[in-house]
């Protein structure tokens, strides 16, 4: 065999290094912050598009109280990752309570202004009267106890570390109350500006009539209502780009027929999903999918956005303005409010993701 010249070897090495650099440049970095109530349902299913996406590094999953209590959510999430064969993804426990809101304050709000349909950890679809004001111990999990442990750092610390490790490359996906993000912003003023973008589930606009004529729960902006102050802090931080997945997310529902389609691929994960099926809109799944593939958006509008913090019936509700009509001096940020998506492509992609995560090669 003829010897390779030094120049040939050098050229090969440079080509190899270039290929590695190109692959690194093509990698998408994401962190998802969510209220991972489980087992099954939209919160758990939200991670599947991220875990299945090629050339995507999931730098962490951070947990916040919302649909459930944070400690129980974390256990459900870690068990899901075990079932999916993705124990490489770090999980960081986060805020157990909103910045200011509480069971007592929400109870008083309901007495004055009417019932909030979904109260998450503080009563679900029922009454808030029996809700614990403090985080209770984790109950036994129907799907089994996780062996995977959380990282030991706080959610806010993981968010900050991930963003600064990859400046202007990390997409932060928030699909629950925004408490962890607000804490990260307050801990590190450079956090939001150093991210690539924020994509969040929330900011329902003009849904009052829907609350009367359709499902009132689907018209309730729970992620904002649960921690309005955190939503305000997050929306007014200097993110390079913000995308809101609000009203549009009610349009695609996880039906039994769709779950049966997913379950045609037999894996431990699809068995888990089918066993824990809940018929709900694909709220959080859509946030993850759009964050990875913004070409799914077929209609949107640009607006300035904030959340109402004044005491009253609109406390915790989003408001948007045209730039020329917005109040001045309030650090309002432009937000892409998604109005429609390519629903068939979104559903097809989600089915492939759910079937592919944890499948044997």
Image: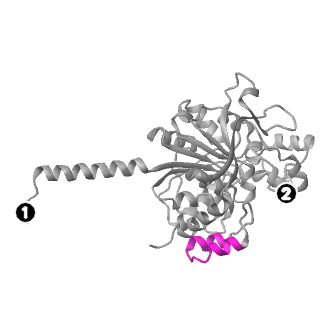
> Is residue 284 among what the camera can see?
yes
**Which of the pair 342/356 is nearer the observer?**
342
Disc nearer the start of the sequence (2/1)? 1
Q: Residue at x 7, y 63 (%)?
A: 2
Q: Quadrant of the N terminus?
A: bottom left
Circle 1 residue: 2
Q: Residue at x 50, y 40 (%)?
A: 163
Q: Position of residue 18 (x, y in %)?
A: 30, 48
Q: Residue furthest top?
A: 329
Question: What whole-number distance in Å separates the C-alpha atoms at marks 2 and 1?
Answer: 75 Å
- Vertical order, 139 against 184 (above or below): below
Label ID, residue 215: 2
Tell me if 269 is positioned left or right of 124 in this view: left
Q: Position of residue 299 (x, y in %)?
A: 68, 49
Query: Which element is circle 2 on?
Result: loop
Looking at the rendering, the stretch of residues picked out in magenta corresponds to 257-275
Tell me if 232 is positioned left or right of 265 in this view: right
Q: Residue furthest left?
A: 2
């Amino acid at each position: 065999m003829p010897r390779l010249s030094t120049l040939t070897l050098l050229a090969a090495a440079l080509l190899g290094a270039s290929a590695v650099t190109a692959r690194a440049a093509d990698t998408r970095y994401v962190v998802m912050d969510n209220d991972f109530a489980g087992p099954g349902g939209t919160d758990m299913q939200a991670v599947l598009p991220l875990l299945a996406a090629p050339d995507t590094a999931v730098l962490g999953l951070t947990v916040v109280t919302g649909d459930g209590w944070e400690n129980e959510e974390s256990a459900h999430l870690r068990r899901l990752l075990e079932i999916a064969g993705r124990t490489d993804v770090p999980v960081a426990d986060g805020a157990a309570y909103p910045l200011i809101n509480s069971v007592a304050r929400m109870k008083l709000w309901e007495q004055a202004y009417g019932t909030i349909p979904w109260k998450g950890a503080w009563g679900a679809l029922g009454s808030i009267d029996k809700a614990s004001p403090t985080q209770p111990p984790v109950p036994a999990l129907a799907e089994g106890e996780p062996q995977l442990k959380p990282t030991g750092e706080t959610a806010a610390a993981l968010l900050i570390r991930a963003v600064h490790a990859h400046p202007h490359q990390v997409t932060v996906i928030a699909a629950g109350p925004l408490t962890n993000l607000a804490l990260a912003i307050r801990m590190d003023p450079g956090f939001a500006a150093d991210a690539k973008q924020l994509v969040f589930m929330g900011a329902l606009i003009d849904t009052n009539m829907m609350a009367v004529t359709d499902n009132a729960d689907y018209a309730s902006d729970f992620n904002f209502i649960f921690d309005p102050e955190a939503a305000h802090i997050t929306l007014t931080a200097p993110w390079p780009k913000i995308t809101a997945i609000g009203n549009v997310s009610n349009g695609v529902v996880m039906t039994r027929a769709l779950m049966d389609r997913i379950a045609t691929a037999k894996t431990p994960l699809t068995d888990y999903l089918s066993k824990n099926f809940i018929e709900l809109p694909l709220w959080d799944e859509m946030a993850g999918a759009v964050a990875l593939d913004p070409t799914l958006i077929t209609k949107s509008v640009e607006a300035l956005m904030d959340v109402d913090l004044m005491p009253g019936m609109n406390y915790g509700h989003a408001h948007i303005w045209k730039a020329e009509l917005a109040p001045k001096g309030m650090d309002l940020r432009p937000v892409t409010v998604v109005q429609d998506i390519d629903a068939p492509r979104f559903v097809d992609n989600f089915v492939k993701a759910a079937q592919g995560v944890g499948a044997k090669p």
